[in-house]
Image (tube, helix red, strand yellow):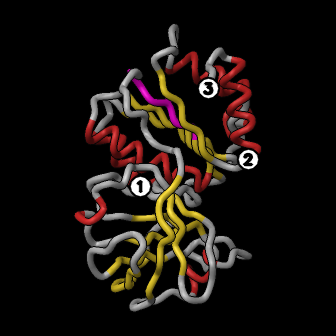
Amino acid sequence: WNVVTKCVRFRCAARYALHAGARLRACTMATLCSRITCASRSALRHIVTGFFEAIGSVICVPPAFSISSANDEPLAITVKKVENGGFARWMNYKAAVGDILFSTGISGFFVMPEQEHYERVFFLAAGSGITPCFALIKFLLQKTDKNIFLIYSNRTEADTIFYDDLKLLQEKFKARFIIRFLFSYKQQVLESRLSHWLLSHLLEEYLPGNKSHTLFFTCGPADYMIMAGISLRSNGILP
């Protein structure tokens, strides 16, 4: 990796409640983001997959970060490297074993509904927007028999967060998990970026006929989510 794409994984020392401090104990190279991982979830059984939390240190006040771990995995968040970002830059360049991080708690609505009135789940993700989707995808594949569809947009394969993990899940659950990777560097203009035209065709390809029992999630840059929302509505899929 070059300096722009390298990243670090951190693991907390032991069990901790979300409002307590977590001390980093290990540091190894990982994918395109920093991942903070807690050693045990036994004290965090109340957490619902997909929520996000705000993590702070003694030197900066960060924004909220999405949880990327499923319910039965060690608690993990994903922090994308942003060259001009405060906390994200500190996490990637300065954080070290022994540093103590603090969480302000969990919030957010990116979770599965309590009532299972759906038959399949369709995810639209771009860039680091895969993070909360990844947590839900793992939960759904491991704990349910639902069919899962993921349309995931990035610049290149090398820029794709969780690329290898998703490929492994796709191989393991090939009968239920369909992924369509879209890479903007490719010359196929109509399929390099998600558009209303392409999304409409993908919906017809993967969800022919009645879409009423499909649950949709979308996460990515603001303009991406606006486009996806408008396109879904025009295809008869209402909030």
Residue carrying label 1:
164
Return the disc, 3 or 2, that comes first in the chain's sequence. 2
Q: Earlier in the sequence, mark 1 or mark 2?
A: 1
Distance from the alpha carbon under mark 3 to that under mark 2: 17 Å
What secondary structure is marked by label 1?
A: helix
Residues in magenta?
Answer: 119-124
Residue lying at 43% horizontally and 33% vertically, measured from the top left: 113
Nearest the camera: 233 or 203? 233
Give the farthest residue toward the top.
Answer: 209
Amino acid residing under circle 3: Pro
State the residue position of label 2. Answer: 222
Q: Of label 3 and label 1, which has the lower sequence position?
A: 1
Residue 120 on the magenta segment: yes
Image quadrant in which the N terminus is located: bottom right
Image height of 187 relative to 128, above or below: above
User: Badge 1: few (under 14), some or many (20 or more) residues near its Cα, within 10 Å?
Assistant: few
User: Of circles 3 and 1, which is in front?
Assistant: 3
Point 74% across, 37% down: residue: 226
Q: Gap between marks 1 and 2, in whole Å? A: 26 Å
> Which of the labelled discs sits on residue 200, or is there none?
none
Residue 175 is inside the magenta segment? no
According to the picture, the residue beneath numbered tag 3 turns out to be 239
Tally the numbered discs: 3
Using the image as rendered, state which of residue 56 and residue 190 is in the foreground.
56
Q: Secondary structure at mark 3?
A: loop
Q: Which quarter of the image is occupied by the C terminus?
A: top right
Amino acid carrying label 1: it is Asp
Q: Nearest the camera: 111 or 121?
A: 111
Q: Do the residues bearing badges 3 and 2 touch, measured as CB atoms within 8 Å?
A: no
Main SS, magenta residues: strand
- Residue at 72%, 18% in the rendered image: 234
Q: CA distance from mark 3 to mark 1?
A: 32 Å
